[in-house]
Image: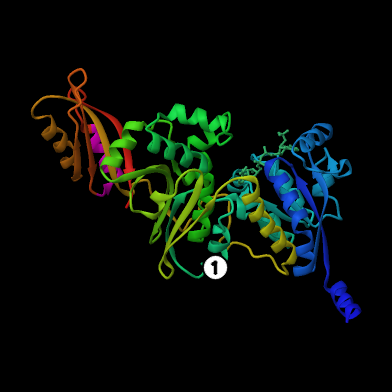
Amino acid sequence: MYSIRTAEYCTRMKSLSLGFLGCGNIGGGVYRLLHEMEETLLQRDQLSLRVAKILVKNVDEALAINASKGLDVPRTLLTEHAEDVTQDPSIDIVCEFMGGEQPAARFMEDALRHGKHVVTANKVALALNWSALQRAAEENHVGLWFEASVGGVIPIIRVLNINLESDRIDRIFGIINGTTNYILTRMAQEGKDYNEVLADAQRLGLAEPNPATDVEGMDAAYKLSILASLAFHGRVTYSNVYREGITGIKAQDIAFGQEMGYTLKLLGIAKKQGSTVETRVHPTFLPKDHPLARVDGSLNAIFVHGMYCQDMMLQGRGAGDMPTASAICGDIVEAALCEKPHYPTFANTEMPSPDFAFTDNWITRAYIRLSAVDAPGVLSRVSECFAKEQVSIASMLQKEDTKEGRVPLIFITHPAHEQAIQRAIAHLDPSICVLEQMIRVEE
Ligand SMILES: NC(=O)c1ccc[n+]([C@@H]2O[C@H](COP(=O)([O-])OP(=O)(O)OC[C@H]3O[C@@H](n4cnc5c(N)ncnc54)[C@H](OP(=O)(O)O)[C@@H]3O)[C@@H](O)[C@H]2O)c1
């Protein structure tokens, strides 16, 4: 009995070699998880995965850093030459964990052109080079896997690419940047200012020393371009995404919003109606009872609406070495076991899909805070500016908080076209009121 099972086991066994490009937080996490899963993969999938080469910038420094993290990577695996990974004929799957657009994208393309499957968590390199990478994958009959590039461990790429492929998604939006969600959550809970919470997040390693990519919304925009392309079956490029970050958010606006029943989140929002597509990343007030409003701290969550699936939401850890490693190892195992790679459905070109009419005149509600002269008649002159553009006011918050003869005037509009709201703001007479804040509101 034992020998028959062993014989079967040996004939079905698949042994593959992996090459890593970079080995920082995520690479280290994947290395650990593969080691931990070794026996299980052998037993369950008859799969043996061996890390054969790892590209680092400097071998001696990498050895010292790995040792300090308790990561036992033999010196013989390390190389300072990318071709040792991307062009080695014995390597089957290349896993890219370097980050940044270049040289990561170039190395991935080289690996694909040398007939290797590629797994990456790199949204920047993917969002900006997706068409070239996919073309290289298709021409060489290999796969490109990128589940961890959006939402960390949340399996949204697979859901859009495979599970919902036959649905008609008309809306996908969510919290796709953990750093900004952490900052906004703490500002809301503790009433602290942006700079104070950002400094704390940097101390805790939750924000980069240079936080621009996260707090200016670039990270979320890269991710949204990937999600929208998959959801709408057509290429939405990074430059199609309107973007505003959270650096101008004041604790008082979060507090006023809370008084009016709203919670502030940095959302990536993509909508499609007919051929009209809007994609935007900006701070957004959501009603307190919206499922996304309750997603706090560094968690991510993505809300999808489709004609047939209706509403659904996925929530989970958007970052962190082991949650991300879990998603990446799922990709690695899929790459290892797949007979025929699955490619996205659409013509993936450098240019935005010609089937889409992109608009920046979306319909939204707006939270508006003005600093207004404390005098009779000011309110009606403000309302006239909005009425002139057919923008009606839904609710108002009055504060008797006079400073130097001025009071805050806070209101939320009914849904209106973005450009009508902007024109109404432009009509305001600066001698009686100035705009201090405008934040879009979703339902
Ligand atoms: N961290 C997360 O929670 C998370 C979540 C989802 C996705 N991701 C994505 O995963 C990727 C890796 O992130 P990470 O957090 O692991 O970053 P990381 O800790 O900075 O690791 C990147 C590693 O790659 C090395 N590297 C960079 N350029 C290289 C080059 N040209 N040659 C050789 N090595 C090079 C870096 O070396 P140096 O340190 O010497 O520069 C570093 O060791 C990124 O694309 C990121 O967006 C991260």
Question: Disc 1 residue type?
Answer: Asn
| Closest to the observer, 284 or 197 | 197
**Residue 256 relative to residue 297: left or right:** left
Q: Position of residue 252 (x, y in %)?
A: 32, 32
Residue 244 in sight in this render: no
Q: Position of residue 384 (x, y in %)?
A: 14, 37
- Report the magenta stretch's main SS: helix
| Closest to the observer, 254 or 346 | 254
| Closest to the observer, 379 or 352 | 379
**Residue 376 relative to residue 361: left or right:** left
Residue identified by numbered label 1: 163
Magenta segment boundaries in residue numbering: 415-426
Figure check: 164 above or below 420: below
Residue 34 in sight in this render: yes
Q: Residue sitting at 15 percent across and 37 percent down?
A: 383
Q: Position of residue 411 (x, y in %)?
A: 22, 39
Q: Position of residue 145 (x, y in %)?
A: 66, 57
Q: Is residue 151 magenta?
A: no
| Residue sitting farthest toward the right | 3
Q: Is residue 418 magenta?
A: yes
For ligand 1, the image quadrant comes to top right
**Residue 183 relative to residue 36: left or right:** left
Q: Residue sitting at 43 percent across and 35 percent down?
A: 246
Q: Residue sitting at 21 percent across and 24 percent down?
A: 430
